[in-house]
Amino acid sequence: MRQDPVDQVFELLADGNRPEALTRLDELLREEPYQGALYALRALISSDLGALDSAAADAVRAREITPDHPFVYYATGVVALEQGAMLEAIQASQTARRLAPEYADAVLLEARARAALGQWDRVLAIAGDLVMREPDNEGAALLATIAREQQHQGPLSPEAWKQLAERFPLNAVARTGAGWTRLNAGQIQAARAEFEQALSLDPALPWAKEGLVLALKARNPAYALLLRFFIWFSRLESRTRTIILVGGLIGYNVLRYSASARPELKPFILPVLVAYLAFLALSWLADPLLNLLLMARPEGRRLLDADARRSALLVGACLAGAAVLGLASLAGRPSLLLSAFAVGFASFAVSAAYGHRGRRRRQLKGLAGTAIVAGLAAGVVSESLQGGMLLVAVLGVVAATWLSHFGTEAPH
């Protein structure tokens, strides 16, 4: 008995063989080019493979052929969500639900889009209603839990995630949530085990990869303390965070002035100043440097995404370049010590750039590049120009770090 070609496509998808499923679907579309639902399915597969332009074209074609099919609008919404077009995703989801009011996947699609917009009240209302109708719907239960915690702006609730993990033991997101609660509690080994279980269920889950990377880096005691601080810091209101950052800078300068004005206090103040500067350096560079160490092992390279690897390599290159320039300054070119300082300092701007995306990243990379060029120039130009070049380099890094924390994000 000959197997239905569409069933073959779904079997390949169930096995995780998306490229082969796409090839088989293309063969089917050549035989039956007027089935909008098949183009919608092709859009979903292409979206999973990262071919968003092709996915968007397939979604348009699907709507042209079959303008009243709920699955077509669901696929359109998924592609829009992947492209970052949240309002379009919501509209497509609502159209799918008008055509099929009980379409649970379309309901979840709207909830996911509203979660990306930070509309947690709406997410909880939508996902909670679906849980009432379908108590065993894993996606709805997970979104409802996340929405409740986001509303309260508190730590991840260990009990809530534990219950979800017990209720849906084969759900990768539930296990990942349990891992994050353990990580927040400082239970590094237990968190790592949860993340590894989640990735065994869904090897591509970004949230689990991010958690496992942090758990691996938290084996370093200094990084573990830094991680706990930033978890606490991230829960504060934006205004409070700004006050702490600005207050730290003011406090540093007050102490520095006091040490200059009262030499007898210098032995007590100097360790505090050094500790503050070390904390700042670690807060900017710990992640990329530990990522660089992770890249030395195949497991680490698989876990890190392209941005994390690129950031680690560029920060490492800045620091290595600074070390080379510093050694060269000892060989008869003392002016190169200025270049060593500037290039090493530029690593802060490089690290800041990869904490953002789109236009803001390009802006920060531009400032980092300016700092590096000016810093290198400071080591080779005449003495009358050295101070100006070094000032440009320092201002470039300061501007980059300031924009990274306080600047308004530019549209992509």
Image (spheres, grey):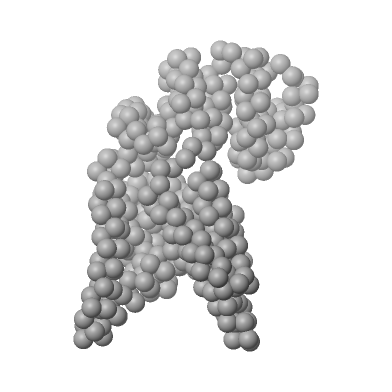
**Residue 378 versus residue 109: which sits nearer the camera?**
378
Side of 78 where 12 appears, left or right? right
Q: Residue furthest front?
A: 384
Side of 164 where 42 appears, left or right? right
- 55 up-or-down from 311: above or below: above
Residue 264: x and y in percent read 21, 86
Side of 178 where 295 appears, left or right? right
**Residue 389 versus residue 270: which sits nearer the camera?**
389
At 34% from the left edge and 60% from the top edge, which residue is drawn?
A: 230
Q: Quadrant of residue 65?
A: top right
Residue 44: x and y in percent read 60, 32
Note whether residue 176 is visible: no
- 159 up-or-down from 268: above or below: above
At 67% from the left edge and 43% from the top edge, which residue is drawn?
A: 17
At 32% from the left edge and 71% from the top edge, which residue is drawn?
A: 276
**Residue 370 versus residue 226: which sits nearer the camera?**
370
Q: How many marks?
A: 0
Residue 319: x and y in percent read 55, 72
**Residue 316 versus residue 260: which sits nearer the camera?**
260
Picture quarter with the N terminus: top right
Note whether residue 64 is visible: yes
Residue 328: x and y in percent read 62, 82
Q: Quadrant of residue 114?
A: top left
At 32% from the left edge and 53% from the top edge, which residue is drawn?
A: 234
- 74 up-or-down from 332: above or below: above
